[in-house]
Amino acid sequence: MKDNIDAHTLLIGLLAYPIRHSLAPTIQNRLYAKLNIPYVYLAFEVKADALPAAIQGIRALGMRGAAVSMPNKQLVCQYLDVLTPAVELSGACNTIANDGGILTGYNTDGSGYMQSLKAAGIDVIGKKMTLIGAGGAASAIAAQAALDGVKEIALFNPNDDFYPKAESLAKRINQNTNCNINVFDLADNKALRAHIADSYLLAHATGIGMKPDEKQSVITDASLFHPDLIVTDCIYVPNKTTLLALAESQGCYIINGISMMLWQGAQQIKIWTGQDIPITYLQQDLNSDH
Ligand code: NAD
């Protein structure tokens, strides 16, 4: 990789905290080297208070852009020049591109999720989905699904700090798209059963099912699933969550979060470099020994 660096090399930053655990720099730099793309990707520990200066740094240094993660995804929107409709609707940005000093904010979590469905031959457009969660991943999925033409979303979340955010997300989506979205308390089992019953797809987007809640599932009653239902989980470790295993046992077609993660990464690379990266390249890097 070092051989590829010269005075023309462009910089992409990952702005998040904590970030030293991330595999993204390894994966991205290997790809750039393999494809002979003159970019380097470096992780920067940026907490919320340092974010305005970091964004100014993108402009001042002429960086190509940045990936944005916790805790900066919502906060960063106010410092950018242009927001895509998905960022406007979801209120979160995970990708910045710098075009001659104009910073555009994108959200590839939602578009990566929708692409992962397409790649699996699943067409949810014009249909109804039930979505569990109202955090960063769920908001991005709801916004992109609504923009892409999903007809109806029943959004379930516990009545916690995220619930009012779900309500304002639903208000924005109902006002700005043709999608009809309604918010329900996850504790309302009757409503959950009724909405899953006439949904084409159930998307799970909370952290329940990954460490330290690996054995848990937001749904424990197997009778809520029907064999025609497609069930997706944003979680990719473990490979098959308790929720997905339960859904599969009821005959549902299941998809875990790996495909969403790979597609959102491929879309980031497309935004920064203009190049379509075969998804298999990302998959290989994921499987390789880091
Ligand atoms: P977040 O912290 O923004 O949101 C957490 C959500 O979980 C909220 O809706 C919250 O109300 C809900 N929640 C918390 N405790 C709960 C409980 N006991 N029962 C039910 N719901 C509960 O998190 P996020 O960034 O949206 O991430 C959610 C999951 O999606 C994580 O597992 C994350 O790793 C995964 N993710 C995957 C991808 C991918 O590319 N596959 C991308 C982003 C996030």
Image: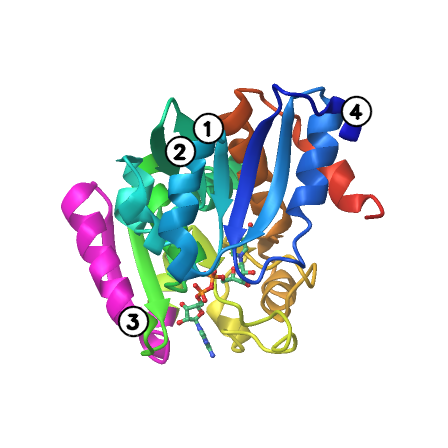
Range covered by the magenta-colored residues: 163-192
Pointer 3 or 1: first along the chain: 1
- Which amino acid is tagged 2? Arg
Q: Secondary structure at mark 3?
A: helix
Q: Main secondary structure of the magenta part?
A: helix
Residue found 53% across the figure and 61% down from its top: 17
Structural distance between the alpha carbons of marks 4 and 3? 50 Å
Residue found 59% across the figure and 78% down from its top: 216
Structural distance between the alpha carbons of marks 3 and 1? 39 Å
* Residue corresponding to mark 3: 163
Which corner quadrant of the image does residue 21 belong to? bottom right
- Which amino acid is tagged 3? Tyr
At which x and y percent is residue 105?
36, 38
- Which amino acid is tagged 4? Asp
Residue found 59% across the figure and 71% down from its top: 209
The answer to whether residue 148 of the structure is visible from this angle is yes
Count of marks, rendered view: 4
Q: Secondary structure at mark 2?
A: helix
Mark 3 or mark 1, whichever is nearer to me: 1
